[in-house]
Amino acid sequence: QVQLVESGGGLVQPGGSLRLSCAASGSIFSIYAMGWYRQAPGKQRELVARITSGGSRNYADSAKGRFTISRDNAKNTVYLQMNSLKSEDTAVYYCNAGTVVTDLGVVNDVWGQGTQVTVSS
């Protein structure tokens, strides 16, 4: 069983910063891609940033220049550094692991429980 646990959300003022963390647990051999998605009230879930095990990154246009995704493969952990936060960044942020190789086989599309990020003065 693979589980993702997010942390680091909270309330921050516009222009502030937050760092989200997501740790994967279980009998994991490797994880190909890990990413962060977000869902604001009344909107669909959208990709924020994604990083492969080799370090290739892609970002939503709204995140470019402000957010940085990184990962520690040894710890099966992915991070999202968010700077210059805006009110429109307010959402529940979800961690995703795309393809996870475990001792019992391959598990696809694992999601965390989500962490709330609120940007407000």
Image: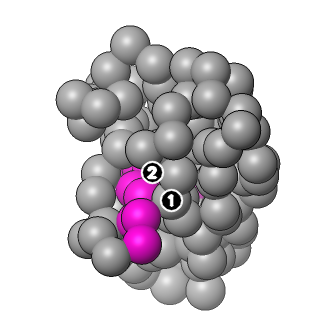
Examine the image and state in which quarter residue 113 appears: bottom right
Query: Mark 1: few, some, or many residues within 10 Å (few <14, many ≥20)?
Result: many
SS assignment at label 2: strand
- Residue 99 quadrant: bottom left
Residue, x 51% and y 33% (percent of image)? 86
Query: Which residue in the rendered view is the most extreme toward the front?
Result: 121
Q: Nearer the viewer, residue 76 or 114?
A: 114
Q: Is residue 12 left or right of residue 107?
A: right
From which residue to which does the magenta span run? 29-41
Give the farthest residue toward the top: 65
Q: Is residue 38 above or below residue 64?
A: below
Amino acid type for the residue under numbered disc 2? Trp
Q: Position of residue 26 (x, y in %)?
A: 68, 73
Residue drawn at (65%, 62%), measured in percent from left and top? Answer: 116
Residue occupied by mark 2: 36
Could you tell me which secondary element the residue under label 1 belongs to?
Answer: strand
Question: Picture coordinates of residue 47 (x, y %)?
Answer: 30, 51
Q: Is residue 101 visible?
A: no
Magenta-drawn stretch, dominant element (helix, strand or loop): strand
Kind of residue indicated by mark 1: Ala
Q: Position of residue 109 (x, y in %)?
A: 35, 73
Residue placed under numbered mark 1 in the picture:
91
Is disc 2 in contact with disc 1, using a CB cutoff of under 8 Å?
Answer: no
